[in-house]
Image (cartoon, coloured by chain):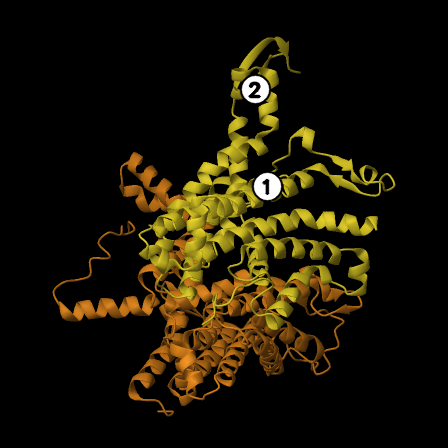
Amino acid sequence: MFGLNKKDTSLLIIVGLLTLLAPFILNPFPEGSAMAQFNAGYPDLMQRFVIFGIFAIGFNILFGLTGYLSFGHAAFLGVGSYSAVWMFKLLSYNIIPAIALSVVVAGVFSLLIGYVSLRRSGIYFSILTLAFAQMSFALAYSVLSNPKFNLTNGETGLQVYADDPQILQGANSPDLPHLFGLPMRATYTMDVGAWSFDFNAGYYFCAIVMMVVFYLSIRIFRSPFGMMLRAVKSNQQRMNYTGLNSKPYTLAAFVISGMYAGLAGGLMAAMDPLAGAERMQWTASGEVVLMTILGGTGTLIGPVLGAGFIKYFENIFSKINDSVLHSWFAFLPDGLEDAVVFVIHPFIGKGWHLTLGILFMLVVIYLPGGLVEGGQRLLNRIKRKKPKTDDATSGKTEPAE
Amino acid sequence: MDAILLQILNGLDKGSAYALIALGLTLIFGTLGVVNFAHGALFMIGAFCAVTLQKLMNLSFETIDESQTDFLGNPLKVETPYVEAWFGPETGATIIDWSVPLAILFAIPIMLAVGYVMERGLIKHFYKRPHADQILVTFGLAIVLQEIVKYFFGANPIQTPAPDALSGSIDLGTMIGFDPNAIIYPIWRLVYFGFAVAIIGAVFSFLQFTTFGMVVRAGMADRETVGLLGINIDRRFTIMFGIAAAVAGLAGVMYGPLNPPNYHMGMDFLVLSFVVVVVGGMGSLPGAVLAGFLLGILESFASTTWATTTIPGINQIIIYLVAIIVLLTRPRGLMGRKGVMEE
């Protein structure tokens, strides 16, 4: 189907089903139950899953295939957001021109940066992209927000004001981002018994976009072009000696991944018409690196998994606090309970980044292929020795329910 | 003329910090060939050594002074730091006042230990892995270290004042024949600059004039041959890692009075220090120091009103701009050697 082989088609279908049914899958616990805080099926978070998924898929096309580690990809995301908000300000709240422009602008931007940065490789490339991204951040944060030429609105962030031209804004079209009249915030809530599921227009728009770009990335991975990129990763020198110029290939990969980032930025602005400079900071670039590595570099599904994993736990872990912990471990004797809570305390709530950092280090050290490789290893082990169930979970404490 | 001198002086303190961090980065890179993204975190840990010592110094016990009363008429509770109780009020107060410089002594063993543990426990396993993996694992480590510090010290900057004798400013202009008040300069910045020069001098003379340093330099040039001569070069490189960590840590200790330390100060410096290393030339120690001071001074010139009105925002981007130009025109940096990091 769609020019894919059987395995890829089934992967695409699985991803499609997962994203389309996400409101159900992510809301397994009834409303109001003690486990309800693990529900991730609310529109805002689901949108972030798919948007960062797109971002990571794009990053993976560059890093996973060519091995060029860019530490400045957030710049393209930020540029995409800014251009989308500008389209809202100038034309109308319709998201199609906004997203189109954000992809185009991010593409042009990444062409410029890529052309310069790709003259060097290895660590120099990382540092050049880092320098460019920090430069864009500094520019967006301060310089481009002076009264005479206010492109980014500095610290406040770019947003739509009532006196903006919005020349195409019809009299009765909604006053917030919409797709030909369908507002992105429109949510239909379905109540089934104790459960409630949110179906959000914005989420489904992002999800469909993600499936399209996921399909594109499969095609890129399987194409001769993708093979060339892999050749760059495995041995660029040999490739050059055989008479192939690798530069156009890497540049194309860079621009494609920049456009993916721009798309993600545009979608972000489409869900919430606001763009701030902090989206371009290098820690944001670091985040997408984390997602891709954690999920599995160079695999198709890895980056999406990584993005979902990080965003999910970022939300859930930050919400767990001491009293929640106490209620979980209430079955333990008092002294022990306090001790356990004391030990776990630094890793939850505000300490989520600590957990993330440790997890990330563990993945880089022991599992360079990320979650995908971990899953494969586990599968292999189960296949080889059927009766032996995985003993990884036995060390975990189950929440008291 | 005096304005130019003032800008050069203004650039010295940031330049010193850049130079020290970049020196440490280059030491690690030159010896072990590892790109250490956690180096900024080491700088930050150094600064928090000073914070910790200051807190330790101010540990105090309460006594009830019957002769005095507070406004409610109760006997007054007097807090006396242990240091003052042990060494007498005069000496004790002086020790507390000088806690930042004293933290140097406190920080050296800690930083050496941190560096040693880091190298043996983590970096060692990454020599054979690609540079991207080294960057990633040290990046993760930087996050972890940063979050640990945040857990213990909170997210807000913590004041670490300089000793009274060294805070305040002096009029440098009159000393070298300018008009009075033309060049007013904070003393601590001078101290910081002098300290940086001393550290840099110490590192260079250690490498240049001791047998240990000679072996290390030989190892930097050709690790394999030195190993074949029956010298345990790995152990020496581990010690160099510790020294590099100590250099970064000391830079952090003394930086506290200039800018109150917070947990992400390392990350802010790290990006710039990498740029400095690249401008100076990967693997070149003099290059790192030179580029550190140059970029610090350049940044300070770009922050003058004249520069910012001519090109708005130039102070924010000058360093990156210079780095991009240098990398594209002189790919090896100002003083880079051939064959370093060139695939």
What colour is chain A? orange
Report whether residue A156 is seen: no
What chain is the yellow one?
Answer: B
Q: Amino acid at mark 2?
A: Glu
Residue B40 coordinates in the image, percent (x, y): 52, 51
Marked residue nearer the N-terminal end (2 or 1): 2
- Residue drawn at point x = 59 percent, y = 40 percent: B254
**Closer-to-camera residue (A196/B66):** B66
Residue farthest to the right?
B179
The part of the image, by quadrant, that contains residue B324 is bottom right
Mark 1 surroundings: few (<14), some (14-19) or many (≥20) residues within 10 A: few
Report whether A188 appears left or right of B12.
left
Q: Indicate the secondary structure of the residue bearing disc 1.
A: helix
The correct choice, above or below, for B142 with respect to A51 in the image is above
Q: Indicate the secondary structure of the residue bearing disc 2.
A: strand
Residue B245 coordinates in the image, percent (x, y): 47, 46
Query: Residue B198: which disc?
Result: 1
Chain letter of mark 2 equals B
Mark 2 surroundings: few (<14), some (14-19) or many (≥20) residues within 10 A: some
Residue under label 2: B79
Report whether A345 appears left or right of A102.
left
Q: Amino acid at mark 1?
A: Ala
Chain letter of mark 1 equals B
